[in-house]
Amino acid sequence: MASQEGRTLALETLAVGAGYDPAEHGGSAKPPIYMTSTFVYASAAQAKAVHEAFFDGDVPERGGKNGFIYARLDHPNLVMAQTRIAALDRAEDSALFSSGMAAVSTLAMSLLRPGDSVMHSRPIYGGTDMLLHTHMNELGVTPFGFTDGVDEAHMTEVANAAMARGPLALIMVESPANPTCAIADIAMISRLADRIALTQRRRPIISVDNTFLGPFLQSPLEHGADLCITSLTKYAGGHSDFLGGSVSGSAAMVGRLKKLRTLFGCHADPHSCWMLLRSVETMSLRTERAGQNAQVIAAYLRDHPKVSRITYLGFLPEGTPARAVYDRQCGGPGSTFSFDVIGGEAEAFRFLDRLKLLRFAVSLGGTETLICHPATTTHYAVPEAARAEVHIGPATMRVSVGIENSGDLIADLAQALEAV
Ligand SMILES: *Cc1c(COP(=O)(O)O)cnc(C)c1O
């Protein structure tokens, strides 16, 4: 239901209804949860037909039109949730996984072969970084990081180094990046992929991790990405009570991921799919409110004498290349950013330990405001020199602003900053 009578439905509408038709489920206004591991065939002929539909050809047939087989392959709640996420990502199809990292790992194992090289933005989510530099590297894949995704000359240089090592199969982009909010120019990277195709006779696949902004603020596929990755654990789940991940793109590419997902057994379970359907109904409201709060809090922190640096996307200076890309590619600055207090680890720790309302935890995108200290938590495993290169210092904090009252959040920040 991406459109109705010729009208393209808006994302807010799709978030509430796409993928679920009460008429197909006894009139139940909300989706039932199909808690079953296996499905009873109607007849021997139907059993054969459903296996043909799943296994013949490159990709499994979508949506259980011929019925279901076994929940690891496909199940009704998975079809509903995948249809809704595909609609939000403006994609042909989407594959849902048990976590964001299950999505990232399945994508990497599907697209990379021994001898290949892979390019990735730096910094990139810690799990993705570790996957590429340890496990994938042990399998014979060489990762090449790039630090400035809006600088075409830098990107070309890294691509040439990668191609000198082996075919460049995949460009993994995270934009905005965690926790620095560094932006990458997806359209420029798509043009780079076209040029790479002329050199190595194979176009690298471009994946963009859209976790930080989500579908209401950025649509990577519309800017030239082949695949859009999301940790649904964050803004889509939205309540810090659920783990999930998705990859959206063409039916052919997503279908191959679904086949591999069946072998890995890392699909999203019926209850998680149901929670996701419920959560994304309010995603546009949560995105809007958290965004308003973030704007107020970012302005407060920017003007505070004990804050030395802030990465809020709304403050990208006019006239810079990153600002131009942001204006073209993003619908808003989102609600996760970093800031530094004046001083070092001691000052940062005193500040964190005094907070009462803001909760000190990793993760982001929940209704509650979370804050963490990347150098000693999310980016603990990243060597200090590499952290410094991307401006993650001893006094850097990452904050994910929630939907509470912004005045209460500022009062808490104010009293804790007195300890710096
Ligand atoms: C959290 C996160 C992931 C991993 O998702 P999980 O659901 O925790 O496995 C991937 N990318 C980004 C940008 C994230 O923030």
Image: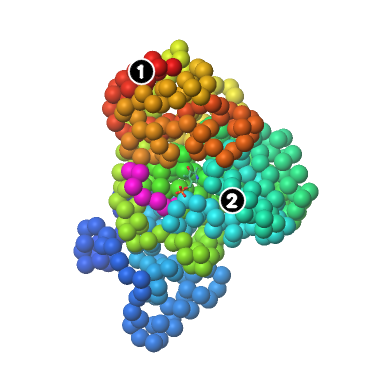
Residue range in magenta is 239-245
Q: Is residue 241 magenta?
A: yes
The answer to whether the residues at label 1 and label 2 have Cβ atoms under 8 Å apart is: no
Helix, strand or loop under label 2:
helix
Count residues near mark 2 (Cα–Cα under 10 Å), then give few for <14, some for 14-19, many for 20+: some
Q: Who comes first in sequence, dot 1 or dot 2? A: 2
Q: Based on the displayed image, in which of its 4 quarters is residue 420 positioned?
A: top left
Its colouring scheme is rainbow
In the rendered image of this protein, does residue 140 appear above or below residue 351? Answer: below
Q: Main secondary structure of the magenta part?
A: loop
Q: Nearer the viewer, residue 196 or 176?
A: 176
The quarter holding residue 383 reads: top right
What's the amino acid at mark 2? Answer: Leu
Disc 1 marks a residue whose amino acid type is Ala
Tell me the element at label 1. helix
Image-based side of 94 in relation to 317, left or right: left
Residue 287 screen position, x and y as percent: 36, 37
Query: What label does residue 414 carry, if any?
Result: 1
Q: Which mark is residue 131?
A: 2
